[in-house]
Image (tube, rainbow, N blue to C red):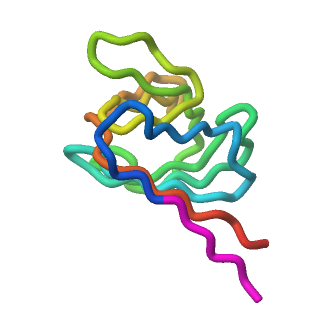
Amino acid sequence: MSDNRTIQLVETSSSTDVVVESLSPFDAILLRTHNSNYRILLLDPKTGRALVEGGSYLLEPSDSLIKGSALPGSDFTPGALCVGARLEMWVNEKAFLTSPIKSVEVKHNSG
């Protein structure tokens, strides 16, 4: 029997954070921003290493480091994805910043 637990966060307050380190390897994060949709497959939640695809720049899964997010005018929150904030990740040794996050959905690996 497969475990299809899903966490959906669609509120607009900063209390709806997903802490990457609290997830498991091969959990998938579906991230919707104001401009794009991203699929993040976590490889190592402790370091933030993941395969990311989506938007107009990441057309194929790319090895990335999920660094965290920040709300405009607020401190950077390492290792967290916050609704309303912009996700920062490193892709091909360059910083990559998304538009503000509208929703985060976590699909837990059932294996």
**Left or right: 23 as drawn, with respect to 15:** right
Q: Residue at x 50, y 49 (%)?
A: 52
Quarter of the figure that contains the C terminus: bottom right
Residue 2 pos. (x, y %): 72, 83
Q: Which residues are magenta?
A: 1-7
Q: Nearer the viewer, residue 100 or 43?
A: 100
- Position of 69 relative to 109 (above/below): above
Would residue 4 appear left or right of 94 to someone viewing this image?
right
Residue 58, percent across and down?
Answer: 39, 48
**Does residue 66 appear left or right of residue 85 in this picture?**
right
Residue at the limit of the structure toward the left, as seen here: 35
Q: Is residue 74 above or below residue 51?
A: above
Which percent across, then down, holds residue 63? 59, 43
Question: Residue 34: x, y in percent?
Answer: 21, 44
> Which secondary structure dominates the residues rendered in magenta?
loop
On whether residue 100 falls in the magenta region, the answer is: no
Which residue is at 74% across, 43% downward? 44
Residue 78: image quadrant is top right
Q: Residue furthest bottom?
A: 1
Q: Which residue is at the front of the view, 36 or 12?
A: 12
Residue occupying the point 49% across, 37% down: 17
Choose top left, top right, bottom left or bottom right for residue 86. top left
